[in-house]
Amino acid sequence: MVSEGSSFVKGMSMGGLFCLVVSLLSGLSPSPKTSTEEHHHHHHVKAPSKDELKELSNAHIQELSKQVQVYCVVMVQPKLIVYWAAALDTWSKHCDKSVFYTSEESKALEAVDLNEKDEWARLRKALKHAYENAGDLRWFFLAQPTTFAIIENLKYLVLTKDPSEPFYLGNVMKSGELEYVDYESGIVLSYEALKRLVHVFQDEEKCPERGNALWKMDDDKQLAECLKYTGVFAENGEDTHGKGLFNSKSVHTLISDSMKANPNNVLEGCCSDMAVTFTGMSPGQMQVMMFGVYRLRPYGHDFHDVLAFYPPEGSNND
């Protein structure tokens, strides 16, 4: 991640330096709480339990499974073309619609060329494009090509959630007083949240396109700042046991960490079996993950899931 900070020009007068510091500190001071922030209730969003699903009729469950469709917004660059190709060939096939947005045109792979070098400005353009071209899709997953996602688990997480409510989900982190969703782990937005975000993009005072000239905030923090003004706040995606579903590490690293911390119960200490994302994997490891997640099956075992999420027809998925 790009670190925040600023550098002062050599030779600047003491008076100018003082004014510069005061200006910077005032820009970093926390904003007073708004009424929407004070009335915000849910912070941890959990996937429905099996008992919750049992209370729903089969017809209702099947209807929900058809309604939960995901538009995947994948931000790519030609310099990461091997990851771009891996994401295209693996997990993105399971999105109901996946669109790759690039900083510049690539002859090798198809994407929406935003013709924008600045990462924050490019992200804004991509989200606006997704909003305007979503059709009937009501959930949006923002990811980088270095992210590996299990879209079916994402759909399960939001199965009983209403996309007309403002949801902003993922792996929540904190920077000062600001809570934000980690970009590398993937960001989930409901239609209502994206609608509010696109609207606040028009307000340069609350959500500037180019940011501060002295210091640059990371894209995920900037996204949280903009959403905050619309009454939308970061929420941690978790399974029914409270385990996080969006991981900022690879499966290998998580297991290695658990072996050190929980040698007698490695899998339990590692990660949720309904995890949505992992990061930090090579393109080859993404292919291995696809095999493990979608193809490898122990004969005679049936998990008795009450519903199934099928990828779109013609997606050439695993």
Image (cartoon, helix red, strand yellow):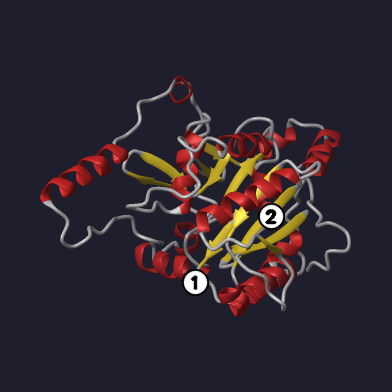
Above or below, 268 against 233 in this view is below
Residue 192 appears left or right of 174: right
What amino acid does circle 2 point to? Cys
Viewer-nearest residue: 20 or 152: 20
At numbered mark 2, what does the secondary structure look like: helix, strand or loop? Answer: strand
Q: Residue 18 location in percent, x, y?
A: 15, 45
State the residue position of label 2: 72
Q: Are marks 1 and 2 in contact (CB under 8 Å)?
A: no
Q: Residue 158 location in percent, x, y?
A: 66, 41
Above or below, 299 against 18 in this view is below
Q: Residue 301 location in percent, x, y?
A: 74, 62
Residue drawn at 48 percent across, 57 percent down: 268
State the residue position of label 1: 252
What amino acid does circle 1 point to? His
Residue drawn at 78 percent across, 68 percent down: 318
**Label of residue 113 in the image:** none
